[in-house]
Image (cartoon, rainbow, N blue to C red):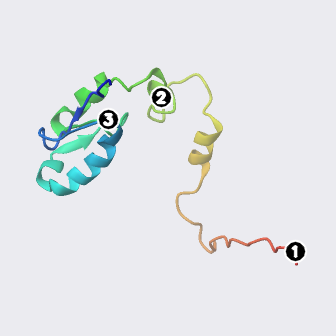
C-alpha cells in the first residue's frame, strides 16, 4: 500500500492532508483563521498556492503552474506592440459599450413558446 504525499496547510502548519482535499481544507481554514488570511494571497496560476502577500509576486514569477500561454498576447496590457491582430473575444470586449446610451432600455429576454 503506497501512501499519498501530504500537503501542509499555509494557515496552520500542523494541518496535513492529501492533495485531493487541500482545496476544501483551505476554504474552511481561511474562515477559521481570518487574521492570518488577511496577510495571505492566492497565486493566479493555482488557487491552492497560498503565500504571504509580500512574497506573491516572487512566487508567481517562479510558479510551477505558470506556462508560456500565460505570457501570451491576451495577458499583456492593451496597447502593447503585438504584430498579430487581437482575437474575436478581445475585440468584443473592446467594442462593447461601457455605459448604456441615453434613452436605451435594457434588453428583455423572451422565451420561446413550446408547442401544445
Q: Closer to the camera, 57 or 50?
A: 50
Q: Can you name the residue that lies furthest to the front here?
A: 1
Identify the secondary structure beneath mark 1. Answer: loop
- If the image is split into quadrants, where does the C terminus sit? bottom right
Within 10 Å of disc 3 (Cα), the crowding (few <14, some 14-19, many 20+) is: some
Q: Can you name the residue that lies furthest to the bottom here?
A: 116
Q: Closer to the camera, 27 or 77?
A: 27
Within 10 Å of disc 2 (Cα), the crowding (few <14, some 14-19, many 20+) is: few
Identify the secondary structure beneath mark 3. Answer: helix
Q: CA distance from mark 3 to mark 1?
A: 51 Å
Vertical side of 73 occupied by 25: above or below? below
Q: CA distance from mark 2 to mark 3?
A: 39 Å
Identify the secondary structure beneath mark 2. Answer: loop
Q: Which disc is residue 80 wearing?
A: 2
Residue pointed to by mark 3: 19
Residue pointed to by mark 1: 115
Query: In this image, 19 relative to 79: left or right?
Result: left
Kindly identify the residue that appears in the image at 28 percent across and 51 percent down: 27
The tag earlier along the polypeptide, 2 or 3, is: 3
Mark 1 and mark 2 in contact? Answer it, CB < 8 Å.
no
Nearer the camera: disc 2 or disc 3: 3
The tag earlier along the polypeptide, 1 or 2, is: 2
Amino acid at each position: 500500500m503506497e501512501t499519498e504525499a501530504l500537503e501542509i496547510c499555509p494557515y496552520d502548519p500542523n494541518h496535513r492532508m492529501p492533495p485531493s482535499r487541500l482545496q476544501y481544507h483551505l476554504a474552511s481554514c481561511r474562515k477559521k483563521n481570518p487574521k492570518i488570511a488577511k496577510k495571505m494571497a492566492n497565486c493566479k496560476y493555482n488557487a491552492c498556492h497560498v503565500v504571504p502577500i509580500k512574497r506573491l509576486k516572487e512566487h508567481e514569477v517562479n510558479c510551477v503552474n505558470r506556462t508560456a500561454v500565460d505570457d501570451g498576447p491576451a495577458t499583456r496590457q492593451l496597447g502593447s506592440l503585438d504584430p498579430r491582430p487581437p482575437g474575436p473575444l478581445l475585440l468584443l470586449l473592446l467594442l462593447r459599450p461601457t455605459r448604456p446610451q441615453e434613452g436605451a432600455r435594457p434588453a428583455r429576454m423572451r422565451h420561446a413558446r413550446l408547442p401544445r
